[in-house]
Image (tube, rainbow, N blue to C red):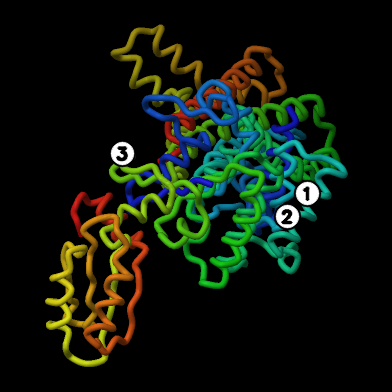
Amino acid sequence: MKQIRIIFKRELAAYFSTPLAFVFIVIFQLLAGAFTFYLGNFFERGQADLSSFFGFHPWLYLFLIPAISLLLLAEERSSGSIELLLCLPLTLWQATLGKFLAAWTFAAIALALTFPIWITVNYLGQPDNGAIVTAYLGSLLMAGGFLAIGVCISAATRNQVIAFILTVVVCFLFLLSGFDLVLGVLQGWLPQLIVDTIASFSFLTHFHALAKGVIDLRDIVFFAALIASWLYASTIVLSLKKAD
Amino acid sequence: MLGFLGPNGAGKTTTMRMIAGFVAPSSGTVSVCGHSLTTDTVAAQACMGYLPEGAPGYDEMTVAGFLRFTADIRGLAGERRRSRMNDVTERLHLAPVLRQRLLTLSKGFRRRVGLAQAIIHDPKVLILDEPTDGLDPNQKQEVRQLIREMAADKIIVISTHILEEVEALCNRVMIIAHGRLLADDTPDGLIARSRYHNAVSLSLTDDSANKVKTDLAALQQVASVELDEATGRITAFPSSEQPLLPEISRLASHLNWSLKELHLESGRMEEVFRKITTGNNA
């Protein structure tokens, strides 16, 4: 536990010791705002809720989260510091979990800094604040899911560009798997059971429920299990490929 | 102190990495301080310090921050952490760069920071992969001095392809090539394997080299004589364990050779190394 905390502290400090943290947070706020007000028609909808805000989070995360996750391991690999880290007395689990938690906290900070929009909507009307909290929770869980995928992929390669692109693609598949477009194509020739399984992996389905303010334990378990299994996969990938 | 010697690509770094627990051996086991690296990795890693090749580190951290991080991971705390930090800072002369980021350090300082993190917990075993690679001669000397100081109470394994380093530092040498152990000896023992061991070299001020060569070859104790045309240096190789030098110096004064120099060769590490790693009598 202590080792995880030390790694966590170092990683989080590492984010803030480069301009990356500030660039990331500023861009995140700008894009979130732009999507909400221009694409989401925040004002025109005339409703005191944040669904136009949360609705774009999956797409925002799709490109921004891989950027933070690849710093975790692909960067260590290319600078060689991974050799130093893994020869310190700590387990792969501790290293991976510490790193993941740092990145997740970083994402949480970026997300928390969107609070002005929450103030705005409260100023303009009487939104259901419980639903908004739930939606924030859902958004954070989804960010964790994307991150865990990113950690695993960045564990596999030293090339940061490859890590970025692969992470985007895999995350995209996880997003899309709930879309009628994809499911419609599959429905024709795959057994219903498999189609349902693929659909059940969709981030969007699980996130939309939470974003509407519905806390379903299944959605939370889904994201938790997803994060745990991708992190577990990361430790396996790391132990197999740490030297090359 | 064990020196690990071999040509580039011989498997030095891989061996070091296996000892440090970074890669797992495909067969066999490694254990350090009685802890197996396969089953008890963390305990084994806790009792050794490791300087990976090229001394990697976290570029964005300051030297002090980086050392504090490794000290924390090593479980040092409170007064002990402070005294160890001061000790390594002083030993490696890191005080002027403590607030600098690793990114901005020169190669010499970077290597020293790498060494500092390896000895921060005062480990029993120290694994150093090419600790002086890429340093200037002064820095090399400094790092060697430091390693020598630590050798008194530690087991140190260094890998290198610099031969003088092994002669200067180690009391045991292993030579590997293509992943196989080819020699395991003391530095003196290795040098004694040299063809030049106990040979006598001389050079002359005039051009009577060919005559001298013939005279030398006539001696009973001399197995063969070589003349290096470029430098005019003559080397006589002994045929037995008998010392050659007294006999030759007697002959020289008897025949009135105009000697520029005359000396006994102790043997050449470089030649032994080449012989062992290539299998030729180079």
Indicate the quadrant containing the N terminus of chain A: top left, top right, bottom left or bottom right: top right
Q: Are marks 3 and 1 in contact (CB under 8 Å)?
A: no
Q: Residues within 10 Å of mark 3 (few under 14, many from 20)?
A: few
Q: Are marks 1 and 2 on the same chain?
A: yes
The residue tagged 1 is B84
Q: Which residue is mark 3?
A: B180
Query: In the image, residue B41 lies at what x, y percent?
Result: 57, 27
Instruction: Kindly give the residue lying farthest to the bottom in the view shown.
Output: B206
Residue B225, how many percent across, how many down?
Answer: 17, 70
Closer-to-camera residue (A173/A82): A82
Seen from the viewer's position, the closer of residues B194 and B99 is B194
Q: Estimate how packed mark 2 is, as few (under 14), some (14 to 19) or many (20 or more) residues with alpha carbons within 10 Å.
A: many
Name which of mark 3 and mark 2 comes first in the sequence.
2
**Subunit bearing disc 1:** B
Amino acid type shown at disc 1: Arg
For the residues labelled 3 and 2, say whether their Cβ atoms are less than 8 Å apart.
no
Secondary element type, mark 1: helix
For disc 2, the chain is B
- Residue A176 lies, in percent from the top left, at 46, 28
Amino acid type at circle 2 is Val
- Amino acid carrying mark 3 in the image: Arg
Please tell me in which quadrant of the rendered image residue A85 appears: top right
Q: Residue at x 61, y 46 (%)?
A: A35
Along the line of sight, which residue is nearer the eye, B45 or A110? B45
Query: Residue drawn at (75%, 63%), measured in percent from left and top?
Result: B99
Q: At 36% across and 47% down in the image, what residue appears?
A: B175
* Quarter placement of the C terminus of chain A: top left
The residues bearing labels 1 and 2 have C-alpha atoms spaced at a distance of: 6 Å
Q: Which residue is mark 2?
A: B88
Q: Residue at x 70, y 38 (%)?
A: B73
In the image: residue B132, left or right of residue A4: left
